[in-house]
Structures are given as structure tokens and as C-alpha cells.
Amino acid sequence: MRMHRSIVGAAVAVLIVGACQGASSPAASPSSSAAASASAGGSPAGSAGTAVLRVARLADAYNFFHPVEFQTGNQFQWYNCIFDTLVKVQDDSKTLTDDLAKTWDVSPDASVYTFHLASGVKWQDGQPFTADDLIYTATWGAQNYDAYKGFLPVWNQLKGAAGVLHTSKPLPGLKKIDDSTVEMTLEAPNSLFLVQLTDAANVIVPQHLLKDVTAANVEKVDFTLGKPGATIGTGPYKLTAFTPDQSLELTANPDYFKGAPKIPKIIFKIFADPSLAVAQLESGDLDLAFRVPPSEFDRLSALPNLNVLSAANPGIVRIVFRTEEAPWSDKRVRQAFYYAINRQGIVDQYYKGRAKVLINPPGFKEYDDLNKYAFNVDKAKQLLSDAGYSGQTFKLMYDQTFPDAAQVMPLIQADLQNAGIKVELVPLDTATYGKNYGSRQGWDGFIAVGGSEALTPNKSEQYFPKDGKHESGYTNPRIYELWAAARSTPDAAKQDESYHELAKILNEDVPQVNLYSPNLVMVSTKRLDGGFKVHLNERETFMNVETWTLQ
Amino acid sequence: MGAYIVRRILISIPVLLGITIIGFIALRAAPGDPLLATANPDVLANLAQHPEILEAERHALGFDQPIFPNQYVAWLGHVLQGDLGYSITSHRPISSEIGSRILSTLFLMVTAMTLAVVIGIPIGVITAVRQYSRVDYGLNALAIFLASTPVFVLGLIAIYVFAVNLHWLPTSDQHTAGKSDFPDALYHLVLPASVLAIVNAAPLVRYTRASMLDVLSSEYVTTARSKGLGSRVVILRHALRNGLIPIITLVALLIPELVAGAVITEQIFNWNGMGQLAVHAADSRDPSLMMGIILIVGTAVLFANIVADIGYAVADPRVRYVRPR
């Protein structure tokens, strides 16, 4: 017992001594932090000397590096730093530039593409890049096409791709002419093939590291999980550190075939909360941020060292109907939704003009002869009564993590109720939203967001799959003919004819109400220069990252 | 004493099993599809067109089996062999997911809690001894103010003042981008650890003060004083020892937080710890990851209870466990 007493006595003594230190620590801490700030040398200027570019894209990130797991714009930007594609696009997201393919030839009917590969290209582990890597990437992609869990590559368009699925057979549409020339023959002509190739789903991956990888184990190999030394590309930056959900460190690849990048290091930060990123932009701890909350626009614009850009974006917020079920199966009811919602009002009042009302799916022109469905409550009521709508509740499901959902959804509900449509809002967490989306349970309509990558109408085709149904349940054989017709011709005017007719059909049938497209706010330090420019499709911004400079 | 500890540990085992069973069933019963939960809304349309992929994956993960007992027993079997499984969202082993986060959390929480105890208890003693003095009023008012301020408010104010305006400290993160040395880690620790220490110290001040006041007015303290003992001896040797007994519970119950992390504080300071991991796991319906966290935190809670019981026995000879006959 004596021992216990002495232990307690000692503990008390420690506490008291500690208390003295604790009491004095408030006095001590300012001086120690003053020392810290002195060593940081006024952190914004001090960190400039180290030439690290600190980047954040404030949207969901997904922690994988193999294209089968490519789902997010963050990955798009990482992949563009680490890997290369055959061709890239400039900041207009249309004009092509060379990448692994130095030049290319296209047959007049847009069905045979011949790529002449750049010479002297090396993988970041020193192995030479050859035509075999391209053959491997395309063949593996076609053989395992259903392993791709997010955005899809183009390899299934090659001739005979369907026949090699789940086999180890060579891909008939792929021919190696010599070590630096590869010919691709498509199943059907596609004039947009080159532009589609620039998507990060089509990055070329190393055969020497991945040849034994199968669809079953691709998710768990080091290459996919992001390990320095295992995740190897041909791109301007090497992966040198990766902490899932926190940060990604990239170091310049001195042997990059287009010349060593000028910024020695890039760090992508992943934030749990966008407001942290805003604080770091203010304090100078972050140099470049994509998709900053629009509400921060004015505050950040006032800072002298930042460029703040509010850019129009094709990504759209839309209401998708359950068109197979009455009364939503009647297109007049769906049209009534258009008339009932004051979309311009939401854009003007909530978004203060930093959004745009759009009548078409992402990427389409706003043709003059389309019905713009200007806000008109009487017309909405008229259509509802014509269709015999008798007050059924419209269960409107949405993911409450969608930007601005909490503020905008009640406005939409109020507008619809005002026109006599009974609306029940069903806010859900992402997991339940995903489940109900898949099972088609618990909603009569839902809010979908997306399509920000769609600068041309063809990118919206993925939302109208031919083999399945549109997420609304809407089908119409004519629209599939039109998508295919647009793809089959290189003539822009003819493509536009098809898209125009498509737009008219969708405008009349209204499988989904296209509400508006919020601007994206991008913030960059004024020290960032060289070839840096935010691309129209912001996720493509890193396509020429090797030309950027940081003062 | 040894037998007592062994007994307490043995009792804890079925309790821990109970915790995991309830956790397991509750997690599986929660709405939502873990396989679709992490999908980007842009690609939902693609995924929904291929239900067969999801079906195959569900089968591979055993999600098509009955939850209890089949799935649970399979999980428990793996855990007993030291295998917590893989996270379905990150595809990494759960032991390494938790391993990397728990160190971050321990670094933050041990610092913060130690500071809280070292600041809170002595101030509580001082305010009790100097009851109704200016020091008492001042410190007490401060403690009440801090105890009732939500931690996120304090955190955001601290970030705004010390990081954004004064540039003394970093706004968030555990390291300066591109650095990983220890001084840099300490530099990033200052703000979150201080905020956490302050909010946890405030209630300790209040409880210690109340408990000490109780003891100081008791008869044996009066007796000690009247024996002519110096007030220092009376307070430190006689009063403090009894006054601290209730505080042992409070401090012991802080132990689980050392591994569970501070959800809100970690979020505010972008601290990649257990709290953020738990939020992420719950949000993405990652069942095995969530179970790993429940197992670790559940163990910590039971451990803390045992520590509290032992603490009582050591501090107060009257609370001596008697073996039932």
C-alpha cells in the first residue's frame, strides 16, 4: 500500500509541476509560434522558393490509377500528369495536338486510323515505350471491357472487339505495321474517334508491368492502388507519394519526351471540406483550385494575388422522370414541369447570374426552333388538366450532397406546388441514392447532375445507351439512329443535322427536364504562368502541364 | 488485485462480442448499397446498365449470404486469424487503413488530452482552494464559456486568427505540402491540439472544482487542519487524493477518444485520423471497414472501463474488490 501511496504522490507532483508548465504555456506559445512564423518566412513567399504547385479540385476523388477504376475529374487530372494518351486537345477542348502519336492518318470514311508514334519515349522506370504497349492497352481494354467501372474507353469500337471479350484472343481491328506505327480499324465509322481518344480512360499503360494482370485482380495490384515505383506512365510527372483521401505528390519526370516539366513538384490535396481549401487559398497554402464554392467568388476576387474565374460549364442539373409509370408517362405532364419551374428566377436570385438556363442535354447547341418552355404557370396548369393529372404525389429523390441542393430543392418544390403538382422531396445520402437509382425504387423522378465533360453532343450519348434504356425508362428507336448517324460522318454540318433533330425530339418528349448549369469557379495564384490556362473542360487543364511555370 | 483484473478482462470478452454482433447487424440493415455508394453520379448510368458486374462482386464479397450467422461468423473467423478484410472502397487491407490513421489520431489526441489534464485539473484545484476569489470567478467564467463553445466554432476562429490573418500557424493538414519532417508535423499539431485541449480541459476544471469543494468541506479535512498541518499538505495529501476519485472516471472515459479520434476537429483541420475514417466508412457503407473501427473503438472503451476500475482501487482503499464467496 505504501508503494501505491508513493505512486499517487508522484503523480500529483507531476501534475502540479505540469500545471506550472501548463500555466506558463500560454505565455510560451506565442513566442514559439512567432519563431515558427519567422522560420516560415511569411509562408506565402517562403513556399514560392520551393516551387511546389499545390492543387485541389473540390469534387469527389477516387483513389485509383488504372483506367478500369477511372470515375472522377480528379483522376482525369492525375492521369494527365502521370500518363499519356495518343492525342490531346487544347484549351478549347476541340483542337487536337500530338501526344504519344506524333502524327496520324484518317481514312476518308473515318473508319481506319493510322498512328505514327513518337520516338524516344520511355516509361518512367526507364523501359522503352513501343507499339506493343499500345497494342496491349487496347487489346486488354477490349478483352475486359466490362471491368471498367466508370468512364469507358474507346477500345470496344475497334473491329471485332465484341468477339474478344472475356477471351485472350488478339483484337482484329488492331494492326501493328512496325515498331512505331499502329493501324486501328473501327467496327463503324466514327469521325469523333480522335477527340474521344483524348479522354483519360484511354491512357496508355505499360505492358511490361501489367501483362499478367486480369480483370479479377486489377483492383488490388500496386499499379492501381498508386504506389511510387509501381504506378508508372510515360507522362511528364512521376507519382512519388500517395496518401489516399489526403494527398498525391508528383515529381517532374526529367526524361519526359516533350522536354522536362518546368515546375519541379505538384501536390494534389484532397479536402474533406471545401471551406478548408478556401482558407488555404487565402493564407497562401494553396495555388490552384477547381470547383470552388460559387458563394466564395466575391471574397476571393478581392485578394490581390489570386485570379478568380467563373466559367460556364456544360454540366447540367436535371430532373429525370420515371416515364414508364402514369401519370409521368404522359409527356404533357412532363412538359408542365418545364413551364412550372421558374428556372431563370433560380439562376438570377440564387446563383446571382453565375449559372445558365439550358434546354438541352450537355453539349448541345441551344437551337432557336426549340421550345424554350419559358416560365408560365397557367400553361402548366392547362397541360396538367389536359392530361388528366389528379394530384398524385411526385416523389423527387436527390442526393443531399449535391452542390446547392439544400437551398435550391425547396424552390423547385414551391414552384411545382404552385402549379398544382404535389411534390414530396426525398433527400438521401449517397449510398441510398445510388441504391434507389439502381433498383428504381422510392422515386417518381430524381435529380441528376453531371455531364461537365460534354462540350460536344456526342458525349451525352452515354446517357442514352442503345442496349439498355435511358435512366428515365424512355426509349425511342429514332434517337439511336440519330446518334449513330452523327458518328458516321466527318461532315460537321451533317452531324449538326442529326443533333438538331435529336434535340427536337428530346425537347418535345421531355424524358428529363434540363434545369440549369451552374458556373464553375476556379482560382489560381498569379505566380502560375507559362502555358497555364484553365480549359473549357476544366478537368482537361493538365494536358499541357509540362509547359507551366511557377514564379 | 491480479485476479480482479483478469476477471474484468474475461467479462469484457462477451461484451465485445455483443458489440460486434449488434454493430454487424445494424450496419447490414442500414439502407443503401455499398457497391454503388462510392460511384460518381456521372457514371451511375453506366453502372446501372451492368447489374451483372455488381451481382458478381456482391457474390464475391459474400453479401448474398444471410447476415446472421453466416456473414458474421465468416467475418469473426477472419478476425480471429488477424485478418480484418479489405475495404470495399479503397481495396486496401483494413489493418493498413486503420494502422496509418490511428497513428495520426494518437499523435493528435494524446497531445491534446495530456494538455487537457495537465491544464484542467490543477486549475480546478486552484479555483476550489481559492473559492469565491477573483481567480476563481475569472477562471470559472472562462471554463464555462469554453465548455459551452462548440469545438468547430473555436477551431474556425483559431484558423481565422492564427493562420489566415496572422500567418503564425498553418490552416490545416498534417504537413506542409512536400514535407514530412517532425518539426513540420509539430508545427501543424499546435492549432488542432490546442483547440482540443482547451475544449476538453474546460469540463475537467468544472468537475475538479466541484469535487474538491466537496472534499474540502468534509470533516476529515477540518480535522487535518485542526491538527495543525500546513495547508499545502492538507490540500495535496488529504483533499486532492479523495477529490480526484470522480475525476478518474472522467479521464478514463477520455481514453476511447484517443483511438476514436475527434470527428469534427479532424474535419476542420483536415487531419487524416480515425474520426475522418469513421465518417468516410459510414458514408460509403463500407461494412468491413466500419466493423474494423467498431472493433478497435469497442476494445478501447472496455479497456478504459477496466482502467477506471483499477484507478479507483488504487486511489481509494475502500473500493477494494472482494471476491464473492
Image (cartoon, coloured by chain):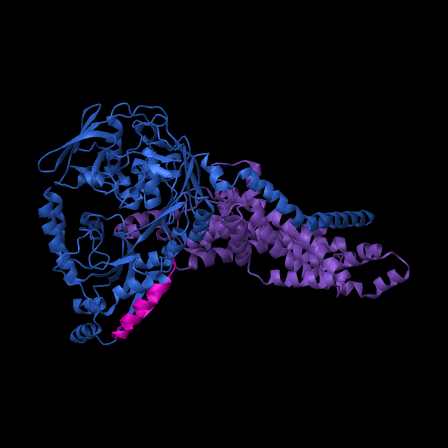
Chain corresponding to purple in the figure = B
Q: Say left or right for B212 vs A263.
A: right
Q: Percent x, y for residue A94? A: 20, 42
Q: Please say whether residue A481 is visible from this viewpoint.
A: no
Q: Please say whether residue B69 is visible from this viewpoint.
A: yes
Q: Nearer the viewer, residue B310 or A511?
A: A511
Q: Say left or right for B138 vs A199.
A: right
Residue A259 colored in magenta in the image: no
Q: Quadrant of residue A107?
A: top left
The residues colored magenta run A406-429
Outermost residue on the right side: it is B227
Residue A408 colored in magenta in the image: yes
Q: Percent x, y for residue B127? A: 73, 60
What is the tally of numbered marks visible in this picture?
0
Q: Say left or right for A218 vs A95.
A: right
In the image, what residue occupies the spot 21% across and 63% down?
A323
Q: Quadrant of residue A251?
A: top left
Q: Percent x, y for residue B11? A: 63, 54
Q: Say left or right for B210 vs A342.
A: right
In the image, what residue occupies the spot 61% across and 62% down?
B145
Chain corresponding to blue in the figure = A
Quadrant of the drawing holding the C terminus of chain B? bottom right
Q: Is residue B166 above or below residue A510?
A: above
Q: Percent x, y for residue A6? A: 80, 47
Q: Nearer the viewer, residue A373 or A232?
A: A373
